[in-house]
Amino acid sequence: MKSVFSRTMSSAVGRLLQARQILCVAEKNDAAKSIAEIMSGGRFRRREGLSKFNKIYEYEYHLNGKNVGIVMTSVSGHLLELEFKSPFQKWRSCNPVTLFDAEVEKYCPENYVDIKRTLEREVRKCQALILWTDCDREGENIGFEIINVCKTVKPNLQVLRARFSEITPHAIRQACENLVEPDQKISDAVDVRQELDLRIGASFTRFQTLRLQKIFPNVLSNQLISYGSCQFPTLGFVVERFKAIQAFVQETFYKIKVTHETEDGNVEFNWKRHRLFNHTACLVLYQICMEDPVATVLDVFTKPKSKWRPLSLDTVELEKIVSRKLKINAKETMRIAEKLYTQGYISYPRTETNIFPKDLNLSALVQQQTVDPHWGAFAQGILDRGGPTPRNGNKSDQAHPPIHPTKYTNNLQGTEQRIYEFVVRHFLACCSQDAQGQETTVEIDIAGERFAGHGLMIIARNYLEVYPYDKWNTKVIPVYERGKKFQPTTIEMVDGETSPPQLLTEADLIALMEKHGIGTDATHAEHIETIKSRMYVGLTADQRFLPGELGMGLVEGYDSMGYEMSKPDLRAELEADLKLVCEGRKDKFSVLHQHVQKYKQVFIEAVTKAKKLDEALSHYFGEVAEVTQSEEFVMEISEPVRKCPQCGRDMVLKPKKDGGYYLSCMGYPNCKSAVWFPDSVLEVSRDDSICPTCKPHPIYRLKFKFKRGSVPPLVPLEFVGCIGGCDEMLREILELRYLRGASQSNNQIVNHVPQSGLENRSFRDRRNTLPKPQEGAFDPLSRIVPSHVGSDNNAVVCNCGQDALLLTVRKEGPNQGRRFYKCNGGSCNFFLWADQDASDSAGRESVSRGSSAPGTGSFHQAGSNRSSSGREAVCTCNQLAVTRTVQKDGPNKGRTFHTCAKPRDQQCGFFQWADENVAPGMTNKRSDGSSPRNGPTAKKPRTCGLCHQPGHTRTKCPQNR
C-alpha cells in the first residue's frame, strides 16, 4: 500500500515540476501574507484581488529543483455554503418534515462572489494548485471547495496540499518539500456533518418557532427558537445541573474538631470518622472525649509530595484554563489564538494532541524566550539543566502538535498579550520540573477517637516559578514525637449542612462536552455562544450558567415526550461515526442516511406529541393560545398518498393559502404535478386503505367531505374514493384528467375546477387549459388526410369560404368513428358533423354548446334558447344560456348573442353570436384574438403565472410559499 502511495505522489510531484505558474490558496489573508513573506524572503509583489479583503502576493520560489512563479491568495473561511433549493428555503413553503429529504445544494454567498471570481481569474494562467488551508477537518473541506471552483475553469488542474502546523520558516519549507494529495475522506466527514446540521436544525427550528409563536404570541411572537443537535445537549447539561441543585435536599451533619496552638504554629486535627448524620451518636462520642481530653501521638511520618506540572496544551485545556484563570470566554479565546497563529506567534490552536512529537526542536523554542525580562531567566534555567523535558499526555490527532509559542514578541497589547503570555508560560512550565515538597502527617488519639493533622514544606517550586495560575502553599506543623501526650487547645462538636453542586462555569461545560463527545475542540465555543444568544441560558454575577425559562421549557417538553433529546447520546454517536468516515472505515452516504432517518423518526414522533411541549412551556409563559384547524394541519406530518406519475416522488396533501386542499408533488418546483380540489371539498385526508386497481402501488384512497348541494343527489357528502383514475364518479365530481404516455415529459395529474360548483365542462372547454399532448401522449383527436365530399358543388365550406377539413373521432365513446368537418385554418371555429342533414344545416350549420363535441360522449338538449342552427345554447357552466341584444351604438347594435344566465360577477365568460356557426364548447374568437365583426368577445379567465390554474394570481398561489 505504501509503495502505491509513493508512486502516486511521485507522479503528482512530477506533473507539478512541469508547471511554470502555481496558484497557492490559504484560508485567510493574514496566513497568505505570512506564508508569502517566508517563501519569498520578504520580496513579494502585492496586488489587489477582486475582493478588497483578500490580496494577491506574487514571487518566485525554488520548488523541487526548479524556479516557478507563485501566485498566493486566500479565501475567508468556507467559500461555499449548503442550503436547500429555492422552494424549501422559505419557512412556510413546506412541512418541516420534508426538509429531511429535500434537495440541497452548495452555493457561493454574495459576499464571497468576488473571492470566487478571483480564483477563477487567477487559475486560468496557472498550471497547478497548492492548498495552504488549515490542516484540520474544516480546512480540508475548504480546500475541496477551492478545488471545485478552480476545476470548473480548468478540469485537468493538478492539485496538491501543504501540511503544516505553524507558520514558521522551518515548517513552511518542510511543507513545500512534502506536498501530499488532499484527503477526500476528511472532507466527506465535514459534508456529512454540514448536511445533517442543516436538515436537523432547519426542521426542528421551523417546527418549534412556527408552533410556539402561535401558542405563546405575547411572549415568543418575535423569537427564533432554534434547535441544533449540539446546542441542545449543551443546553441539557446546564438544565441538568440546575435541576440537580433544585432537587438537592440539605442534611445536617455533626463532627468533632480538635485544635492545638503552640509557639511553632497552629494545627487543626481532622476526625477520622469525618462526620456523622446522627446527632445523638456524635454527642455520645464527644462526651467520651471530654471525659479524658488528653491527646496521645500515635504516629508521625513524612513523605515526599509533588505537584505535577501541566500537560502540554491542547485546545480544550486552553479554553478551560483561560476561562477559569483569565476570565476570557472560549469564543474570544479562540478568535485571538487564531489571530496569533496567522501572525506566526503560536502554533495552530485547534488541536486534540497533548504529546510533543520527538522531531520537534523544543530547545530552540525555549531559547527564543530567554530574552524576555519576566520569564527569560526561567527559560535559560531549563536549558542549563539539560534542556526541556515536557510532560506529555496520551492524546494525538496525528495532525498537529500541542499549542506552543513559535516566535518571541513583546509588542502585543491587551487580551492578545495576556493569551500569548499564558501560552508561553504554560509551555515553559510543561518543559520544566514538578514542584517538590514534603508532607508531614501526625495522628493522635483522644479517648479512643483518632484524629490527623497535616503540614507541608515546599522544597523546590520549579514550574511554579513561571506558572502563577497554580497555587501551592507551605503549611507549617510543629514537631511532634511518637508516644508524647499533650493537652489540645480546643475540642468542639460542630455541625454543618451538606451543600448542593454549583452551577456550571464555562470551563465545566466545555469539560462535559468533551467527555460526552459533543462537538469538537473547534466548535465547543460556538455551541456555547449559540445557547447564550438564543436566551436559552444566562450568566450569573460570578459567570456561571443559569437556564432561562425558554431553555427549561424546551428541555422539559422534549423529556416529557420520552426522548432524551437534551442528552448527548444521539450527537455522540454521530461524532463517533464521523471519525470512522475520516479513517475510511465507514461510507459517507451510509452514515448520512442512517442519521437522517434516525432524527427524522424522532421529529415525526415529536410533532405528534407537540402538545407536551406546549404544556411544559405553559408553566413558564402562562395560558396556551388556541391553534386553528388549518394552522394545526401545517404542523401535522403529511403522509404520502401516491407516487407522482411524472417524477416518481411522493405526492402529499397540502392546505391552500385561502382555504381548501390540494395534492402536491414533493419534487416541486422541478415537478409541478398537482391535483387541485375545488372549494366544495371541505375536508380531505388519507385513508388507510389502498386501491387494488390503480398503479403504481400503493395509491391510498382519500376521505372527502363535500359542501351540501355541491354533488349529485345520490352521492353522499362524505365518502372514500380513489383519485388514481379508477373511480369514474370522483373523476367527474373533481374533474380529474390523467394524461398518459410513459415517454411524455408532462405526464402529470391535472384537474380544473369550474368557477361555480362541480358541474362538468365539456372536454372542448377543458382542453384549452391542459398541457399540449407531446409524442407518446394520448391525443383525443387523431388527424387524417383531408377529404372533400362529392364534387366541388357539394364541398363543405367553412365560414372563411374555404373547403372544410374532414376528420374522424378516435377517442373511445359514443362518437368514436364519427366523421366531422372543421375549419382548415382554425380561424372561424367552424364545426359540422358529416352525417348531419345538409338541408338542415345548409352547409354552414352551427352546433350549439349542448351538442356532443368529439370525445365528450354526451349530448345535452333542453331549454328554449336556440342558436342559428335551431339548437339550444348552453354556456360553460352547462346551464341554458340567455339571449340578449346589443344596445350599444356601433356596427353590432341590434345583434343578438347568447351569454351565461348568472349574475355578472358569477358568469363563466361564455359568449356566442346567435347568427354565427360555432363549434361546440368553443368561444366565438378568431385566431388573432379578435371577435368577428369587432363585437364583444368571451372573457378569457385569468390564470396563475406559477401553476397556470384559474381562480388566483401568482402572489396568492398555494405553491408560492
Image (cartoon, rainbow, N blue to C red):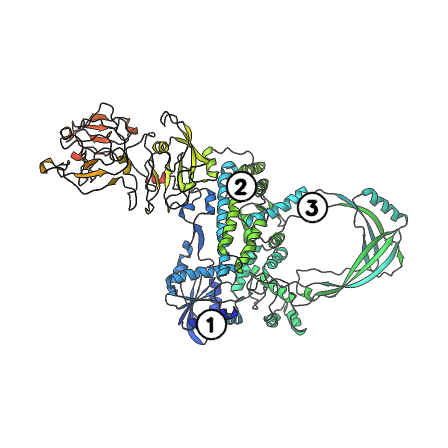
The extreme left residue here reads: 793
Marks 1 and 2, how far apart at CA: 55 Å
- The image's mark for residue 606 is 2
Query: 139 and 286: which one is in front?
Result: 139
The residue under label 3 is 500
In screen coordinates, is 859 left or right of 187? left
Query: For the residues carrying marks 1 and 3, which lies nearer the camera in this image?
Result: 1
Check disc 2: other Cα within 10 Å, few if <14, some if 14-19, many if 20+.
many
Q: Position of residue 496 (x, y in %)?
A: 76, 45
Location of residue 738 in the rendering, given as x and y in whole percent from the top left corner: 34, 39
Query: Dot 2: what SS?
Result: helix
Three-letter amino acid code at the position of disc 1: Ser
Distance from Cα at disc 1 to Cα at disc 3: 63 Å
Query: Where does the image place residue 491, in percent across and percent down from the top left?
Result: 84, 50
Query: Residue 627 has which mark?
Result: none
Of residues 205 and 516, the one drawn nearer to the viewer in this rendering: 516
Q: Where is 766 relative to 227, above or below?
A: above
Single out the mark in the foreground, 2 or 3: 2
Query: For residue 10, which numbered disc appears in the image?
Result: 1
Task: Give the alpha-carbon distance from disc 2 to disc 3, as whole Å.
Answer: 33 Å
Which image quadrant: the C terminus? top left
Q: Amino acid at mark 2?
A: Ala
Quadrant location of residue 729? top left
Q: Residue at x 64, y 46 (%)?
A: 241
Name above or below for residue 232 compared with residue 482.
above
Question: For the residue labelled by badge 1, is the local secondary structure a helix, a strand or a loop?
Answer: helix
Most distant residue in the right direction: 292
Residue at coordinates 49% horizontally, 42% vertically from top-left?
207
Callout 3: SS: loop
Work out whether mark 2 precedes mark 3 in sequence or the reverse, and give the earlier one.
3
Task: Pick whichever of labels 1 and 3 is earlier in the sequence.
Answer: 1
**Residue 130: percent from the left, percent from the top?**
45, 67
